[in-house]
Image (tube, rainbow, N blue to C red):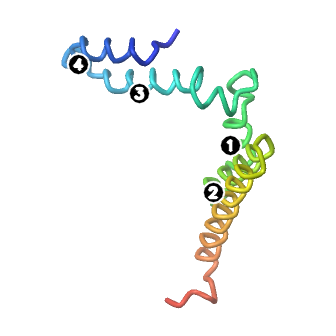
Amino acid sequence: MPMKNDELLTFLNNYHKDEDPYFSLKRVLEEASEQAISGKGRERHASEEPYEQQKICTITRWVRLSPVAGPLFQAIKKAVESSRLDAEHAIFELQGTINYLAAAIIVLEEERGNPFDKKA
């Protein structure tokens, strides 16, 4: 079971980092696990599904072969999140979706040689 933030801080303050060459990796993994299990990850994304069935894995599978997988992932995630929010926050998330899709278009246009690129 991961440590809570105050337990983690106590551990880090008392731990001799020089004795473990993997100390920083262990710390980061522990903090990330804590976030997924009890922080924002659980609060906004989990729905009590096993981790490998949560959106973080499902969306990654959908877009993994795309040259613009990063922005597509974020756009899909934000669109899904918007459906659970009040109108004001949903609009904010959907505006973010538009920005991620615009980034995807720009990168794809760069790859094909965009005729609107002023550098060309």
N-terminal-most mark, 4 or 2: 4
Query: What separation in Å lies between label 3 and label 1 (alpha carbons)?
Result: 22 Å
Report the residue at 75% width, 50% height from top: 79
Vertically, is 93 above or below 112?
above
Q: Residues within 10 Å of mark 1 (few under 14, many from 20)?
A: some
According to the image, label 2 marks what residue?
A: 71
Q: CA distance from mark 2 to mark 3?
A: 25 Å
Label 4: which residue? Answer: 17
Q: Does residue 24 lie above or below 109 as drawn?
A: above
Question: SS at mark 2?
Answer: helix
On residue 1, which mark appears?
none
Kindly report the distance in space between the C-alpha atoms of the residues bearing marks 1 and 2: 11 Å
Q: Is residue 45 above or below residue 49?
A: below
Quick one: 63 or 9, which is closer to the camera? Answer: 9
Which label is found at residue 28? Answer: 3
Q: Secondary structure at mark 3?
A: helix
Q: Earlier in the sequence, mark 1 or mark 2?
A: 1
- Amino acid type indicated by mark 3: Val
Q: Mark 1 sits on what residue?
A: 60
Task: Tell me, yes or no, whether the two marked residues, 4 and 3, touch with CB atoms within 8 Å.
Answer: no
Q: Nearer the viewer, residue 61 or 24?
A: 24
At a point 60% along the width and 70% down the height, the residue shown is 107
Residue 83 in the image: state x and y as whole percent. Answer: 80, 45
Is 107 situated left or right of 62 in this image?
A: left
Within-10-Å neighbours for mark 4: few <14, some 14–19, many 20+: few
* Amino acid on which disc 2 is placed: Pro
Expressed as whole percent of the image width and height from the top left, the position of residue 18 reads 19, 19
Mark 2 in CB contact with mark 3 (< 8 angstroms): no
Name the kind of residue labelled 1 in the image.
Thr
Q: Label 2 neighbourhood size at 10 Å, few (<14), some (14-19), many (20+)? A: many
Dot 1: element: helix
Tell me if mark 3 has few (under 14), some (14-19) or many (20+) residues whose alpha carbon lies within 10 angstroms of its own. few
